[in-house]
Image (spheres, rainbow, N blue to C red):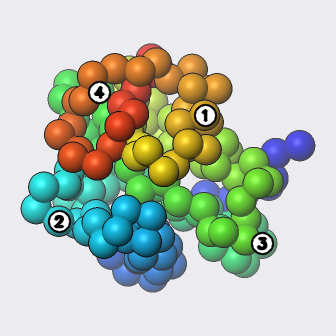
Amino acid sequence: MAPNVEFRPEHVDRGDGAALAQAMREEIELLYDGLQLDGPDMPKAGPDELSPPHGTFVVGRIGDVAVCCGGVKRLEEGACEIKKMFVTPRSRGQGVARVLLHELEDRARRLGYTVARLDTGPRQEHARRLYLSEGYAEIPNFNGNPMATFFAEKAL
């Protein structure tokens, strides 16, 4: 049974959104030996990209506790990228990531996108398995992310 997560649009650079995005950055830095997600060689996913009118960023809560976040960023006409998907360690293994992915896909559709793309790195096999199980098909590197090894897309 899927957990009951309530999603609200928030900001990636303040409040719970900023706290979750920072926790994700810290985890990525450990997984990938100091990799800076906001470094100059990485695809951009800040307030400009993850805000209306072409993007969004949401925080999911179970009760009063912020448990996940993620965003949608415009790529080109009709296509978006799902960014900054993160579930707190305490909330993992409960289906929160799948519920979050569905929410981001729904919001992408509402923004008018017909294709969602995403990527993940070699040390996040759980994310790769989730994306494949949700119908994402592997594609070539679409965003120049130097650390990602899996790039995929799905028709929305």
Q: Residues within 10 Å of mark 4 (few under 14, many from 20)?
A: many
Label 3 sits on residue: 63
For discs 1 and 3, the disc positioned in front in the rendered view: 1
Q: Which residue is nearer to you in this view: 30 or 8?
A: 30
How many labels were placed on the picture?
4
> What whole-number distance in Å separates the C-alpha atoms at marks 1 and 4?
22 Å
Q: What residue is rendered at 17% in x and 40% in y?
A: 144
Give whichever of discs 2 and 4 has the lower sequence position: 2
Q: Which residue is mark 2?
A: 39
Q: Are marks 2 and 1 in contact (CB under 8 Å)?
A: no
Q: Outermost residue toward the front?
A: 33
Between discs 2 and 1, the one toward the N terminus: 2
The residue labelled by disc 1 is 129
Q: Secondary structure at mark 2?
A: loop
Q: Amino acid at mark 2?
A: Gly
Q: Position of residue 143 (x, y in %)?
A: 21, 37
Q: Is residue 140 left or right of residue 39?
A: right
3 or 2: tag closer to the N-terminus: 2
Q: Is residue 80 visible?
A: yes
Helix or strand or loop: what does disc 4 sit on? strand
The 10 Å Cα crowd at callout 2, few under 14, some 14 to 19, many 20 or more, is: few
Spatial CA distance of label 1 from label 3 is 28 Å
The Cα–Cα distance between marks 3 and 4, rounded to whole angstroms, is: 33 Å
Residue 85 spot, x, y in % from top left: 49, 54
Mark 4 residue type: Ala
Identify the residue under disc 4: 79
Q: Residue at x 89, y 43 (%)?
A: 1
Secondary structure found at label 3 = loop
Residue 81, image quadrant: top left
Q: Which comes before the other along the chain, label 3 or label 4?
A: 3
- x 25%, y 39%: residue: 74
Q: Position of residue 104 (x, y in %)?
A: 51, 43
